[in-house]
Image (tube, rainbow, N blue to C red):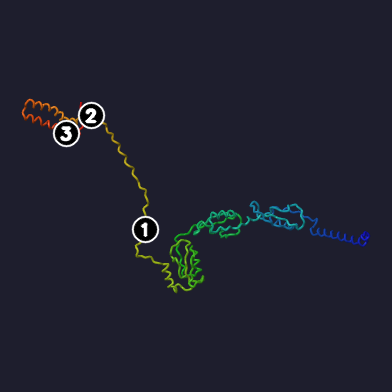
């Protein structure tokens, strides 16, 4: 077996194989050197703070490619000014290497206008500031949507939602101020449905029910009746119902009379008119101050002697005849014993009888003994 390995034919084949392998490797490296420009390096030029047009021209002359990337806008630098280069200036790169340029954009990055239509104005302002838009003028416009955002204006034109604007742009906001009152309703009889819609919208009303006589929805039908009637006064946003047909209003007089009987009812004038009287304003009752109470009278007390003296006077008048009677009684007895005449006896007995009967008439008299 060893003899077969050292056979000259085997050795020749082995040498040929090694030579082919080495040749292929050498050719591969030579091809890589040629393809990658091995040993040929170019220094990166210093193009920082140049304009992007000047930087591109320098790179083209040096045989280098470039890629431009816009960084965040910085108002301290000029628009389209090169702020950064990668690889850094002075680095050696091969011919054809792409150099990354970061350029200051012309203005702020664009942002989308948020959808804040028909939203409350306070929330809409917050949303606009969050995306980077500033609110300029606030314009109020009559609308039934009070305090709601109707439109967003940018440079005098309406900016619809998702429109891209430069960041920190100033936008004007149109807000509803509430409906207008007492607007005269326009006349749309004789117009087509399409024309009537435009007239009603300009007058700040809305189209209500549109009833076609033939049941179709042709916008070219002629309006022959409307409710409310033309000239009536309504508030903004009220609906106007329309009746349309391909016939003229003159041909539909019977239909118009029928609609008048429903929508144009005349008030009954036989009833007395209703009078509205304003109630007088409630007034708080006024109360007068009560008169001052009279000062209490102070009675001067009578002295005790005066009270004492009054009481005996009354008693003495009542009891005096009793005392007299008692004094005369012995006299009468005395005259009878001395043998006086009967006249004297009767005369003396009279007062005695009276004096004896008087105390019987007043049994409740208070007797006061005076010493």
Q: Secondary structure at mark 3?
A: helix
Image position of 316 (left or right of 285) = left
Rendered residue at 34%/45% (across/down): 287
Percent of width and height locating residue 55: 71, 56
Question: Dot 3: within a 10 Å radius of its alpha carbon, few (fewer than 14), some, or many (20 or more) residues?
Answer: few
**CA separation, marks 1 and 3?**
88 Å
Question: Dot 2: within a 10 Å radius of its alpha carbon, few (fewer than 14), some, or many (20 or more) residues?
Answer: few
Asked whether the beta carbons under mark 1 and mark 3 sit within 8 Å of each other, the answer is no
Q: Secondary structure at mark 1?
A: loop
The tag earlier along the polypeptide, 1 or 2, is: 1
**CA separation, marks 2 and 3?**
26 Å
Name the quadrant containing residue 256: bottom left
Tag 1 residue: 276
Percent of width and height locating residue 221: 49, 71
Asked whether the beta carbons under mark 2 and mark 3 sit within 8 Å of each other, the answer is no
Percent of width and height locating residue 161: 58, 59
Above or below residue 227? Residue 119 is above
Above or below residue 244? Residue 163 is above
Tag 3 residue: 360
**CA separation, marks 1 and 2?**
82 Å
The tag earlier along the polypeptide, 1 or 3, is: 1
Foreground mark, 1 or 3?
3
Asked whether the beta carbons under mark 1 and mark 2 sit within 8 Å of each other, the answer is no
Indicate the quadrant containing the N terminus: top left, top right, bottom left or bottom right. bottom right
Indicate the quadrant containing the C terminus: top left, top right, bottom left or bottom right. top left
Rendered residue at 64%/51% (across/down): 76
Image position of 74 (left or right of 264) = right
Residue 308's tag is: 2
Rendered residue at 57%/56% (across/down): 171
């Amino acid at each position: 077996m060893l003899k077969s390995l050292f056979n000259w034919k085997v050795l020749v084949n082995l040498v040929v194989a090694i030579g082919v392998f080495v040749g292929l490797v050498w050719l591969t490296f030579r091809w890589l050197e040629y393809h990658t420009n091995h040993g040929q390096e170019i220094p990166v030029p210093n193009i920082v703070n140049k304009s992007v047009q000047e930087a591109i021209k320098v790179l083209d002359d040096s045989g280098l490619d470039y890629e431009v990337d816009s960084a965040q806008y910085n108002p301290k630098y000029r628009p389209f000014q090169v702020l950064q280069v990668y690889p850094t200036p002075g680095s050696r790169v091969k011919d054809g290497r792409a150099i990354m340029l970061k350029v200051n954009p012309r203005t702020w990055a664009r942002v989308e206008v948020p959808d804040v239509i028909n939203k409350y104005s306070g929330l809409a302002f917050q949303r606009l500031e969050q995306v980077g838009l500033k609110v300029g003028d606030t314009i109020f416009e009559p609308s039934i949507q009070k305090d709601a955002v109707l439109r967003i204006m940018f440079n005098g034109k309406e900016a619809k939602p998702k429109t891209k604007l430069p960041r920190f742009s100033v936008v004007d906001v149109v807000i509803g101020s509430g409906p207008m009152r007492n607007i005269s309703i326009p006349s749309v009889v004789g117009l087509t449905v399409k024309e009537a819609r435009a007239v009603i919208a300009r007058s700040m009303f809305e189209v209500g029910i549109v009833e076609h006589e033939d049941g179709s929805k042709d916008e070219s039908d002629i309006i022959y009746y409307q409710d409310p009637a033309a000239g009536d006064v309504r508030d903004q946003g009220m609906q106007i119902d329309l009746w349309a047909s391909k016939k003229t209003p003159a041909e539909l007089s019977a239909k118009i009379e029928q609609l008048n009987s429903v929508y144009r009812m005349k008030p009954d004038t036989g009833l007395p008119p209703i009078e509205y009287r304003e109630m007088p304003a409630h007034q708080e009752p006024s109360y007068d101050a009560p008169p001052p109470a009279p000062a209490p009278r102070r009675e001067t007390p009578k002295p005790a002697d005066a009270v004492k003296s009054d009481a005996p006077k009354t008693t003495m008048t009542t009891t005096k005849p009793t005392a007299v009677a008692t004094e005369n009684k012995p006299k009468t007895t005395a005259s009878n014993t001395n043998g006086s005449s009967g006249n004297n006896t009767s005369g003396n007995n009279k007062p005695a009888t009276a004096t004896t009967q008087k105390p019987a008439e007043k049994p409740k008299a208070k007797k006061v003994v005076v010493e």
